[in-house]
Amino acid sequence: MRIGKYQFKPRLIPSLLVVVLFPLLLRLGFWQLARADQKRVILANQHAKMDLPPLPIVQRVGANDDLEYRHLQVSGTFLDKYQIFIDNKVSQGQAGYDVVTPLRIKQTNQVVLVDRGWVPLGNSRAELPHIDTPDQEVTLTGIADYHTKDVVSFGAANRSNQGWPAVVRWVDIQEIQAETKLDLAPFMLLLDPKERYGFVRNWQFVNMPPAKHVSYAVQWFTMALVLLVIYIVVNTKRIHESGTQDE
């Protein structure tokens, strides 16, 4: 195809590569935009539930109760014997643990795992941080989190030690229930940042916000455009008056 003093004459192999890669890059970009829309819907639903007033828990909670992302208010006593440290948690570039303490709910035999927030590592990994836990009855408010397993954790090994306090990579409610014989609620309570008895709390409810997906989409679209420009430039030659082309 000739345009003025230039002729576009694509070669076979580069053309085949572009035919395969260009639509793939576009598809990846549109997929990231779709993921951004999905995350916006998820966040909107979460915020709608979080805006509801705290729901007092005065009876046993079942697995089918729709409490995800609700603010709950519970009264009870901590079971310091079964303290849990979630390993590999980072706050402002510093390594540490999330501290999870079971709380026996008042007027029931049910126990809820309360994530009290982040603490830094001790002097070494062999020495766990000292955690002060009140003995008296407390009333707490927090958000119900049903997704306790860290989706970025790889491998089957969860426990890093034996006995208690437990050091784990993620909270497996069924595993803890089997080991302790406690009647555990089917969620973990993320302690409200304004509550006492907690540590550093900056709860995140999506691993990747919508803006990040949009950023990735822009990158895929940019790569598609660059690929197309390179393909056109490489396969376009200037025609001289003698009829020859630039090599």
Image: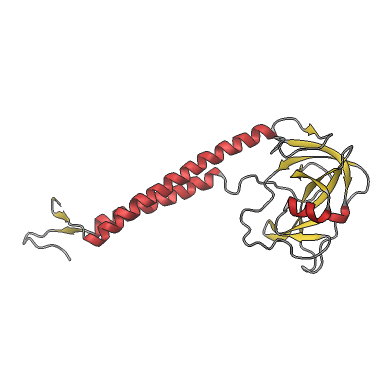
Whether residue 99 is visible: no
User: How are the colours assigned in the image?
Assistant: secondary structure
What residue appears at the point 93 percent right and 48 percent down from the top-left corner?
135
Please state the horizontal and vertical placement of residue 9, each as a whole percent of the image.
17, 57
Residue 227's place in the image compared with 203, above or below, is below
- 33 horizontally vs 84: left or right: left
- 227 horizontally vs 91: left or right: left
Please state the horizontal and vertical placement of residue 158, each as a whole percent of the image.
70, 61
Whether residue 160 is visible: yes
Q: Decide which of 4, 235 is in the foreground and name it.
A: 235
Q: Decide which of 198, 239 is in the foreground and name it.
A: 198
Q: Decide which of 216, 187 is in the foreground and name it.
A: 187
What residue appears at the point 60 percent right and 35 percent down from the top-left corner?
44
What is the quadrant of the C terminus in the image? bottom left
Please state the horizontal and vertical placement of residue 117, each as a whole percent of the image.
76, 50
Please state the horizontal and vertical placement of residue 210, each as a whole percent of the image.
54, 43
Residue 85 appears in which quarter of the rendering?
A: bottom right
- 22 horizontally vs 35: left or right: left
